[in-house]
Amino acid sequence: MSTLTLGRRRHFAAAALLLSAAISLTACGEQRAADTAADAPSTPPSSNPSSPDASPYVEPGVVDGAPHNGDNNAYRRSRKMSPASAKDAQKEADRIDPVLKRLWGQKKWDPKSVRQALLQLGYEEERTGPDGERLAGTLTMREMDSRYKVDHYVTAEGALVGLRVHDDACVTAFVQKTNYEVKINGPFMETGCFEPPYGH
């Protein structure tokens, strides 16, 4: 008979243990009426409630909530220019602007015509070594970037201009059938003076 009592005690103890665990877990995350205002946070509630499902990794200024957007697009950010370099770059941009305006008015936006006009300003075409190191010159010319249109790639008529003013400063420009633009920026991590295309 003592075995039967011992078995009942074990069952009772196991049932009591499970019941106490279940009771304590049902109150998880609940706010009880006994909680006072003193326990509440001292910061006022936000007028823009955030979604409880919002990612904690969203960066400020990211519209679609894509985490790590800034890291993923770091290759598209130009380096900072020093104030002195920015001033020098603006001087060169002011020299290039009227030349591109004239070429655009003459409907000459092919890379060869643009290159000739800019070389007449005294710029030297940039040359690089076998490992991509810059050897001499500051001017880089190329065709417009190709763009995907419906089912194939199209390259618009025109020329892209990159002028390395200092190691931290560039003049970037383009001239094409519809318009032209001249601006200053720092160099890009992978593409020098030219803004890289989007990855996808």
Image (spheres, helix red, strand yellow):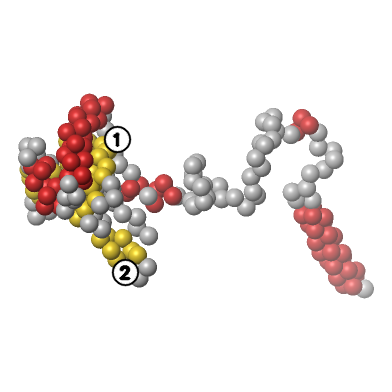
Q: Residue at x 25, y 58 (%)?
A: 156
Q: Which quarter of the image is occupied by the C terminus?
A: bottom left
Q: Position of residue 133 (x, y in %)?
A: 12, 48
**Residue pointed to by mark 1:** 80
Q: Which residue is mark 2?
A: 152
Q: Give the residue type that dot 1 points to.
A: Lys
Please report the residue visible at 34 percent of the width from the left and 55 percent of the height from the top.
198
Q: Position of residue 188 (x, y in %)?
A: 27, 45
Closer mark to the observer between disc 1 and disc 2:
2
Residue closer to the observer: 178 or 155: 178
Coordinates of residue 190 in the picture (x, y in percent): 25, 50
In the orientation shown, which residue stands out farthest toward the right? 1
Residue 167 visible to the viewer:
no
Foreground of the two, 13 or 92: 92
Residue type at numbered disc 2: His
N-terminal of the two: label 1 or label 2? Answer: 1
Q: Secondary structure at mark 2?
A: strand
Quadrant in which the N terminus appears: bottom right
Q: Is residue 19 above or below residue 68?
A: below
Relative to 103, residue 199 above or below:
below
Instruction: Say whether residue 148 is left or right of residue 90.
Output: right
Give the quadrant of residue 45.
top right
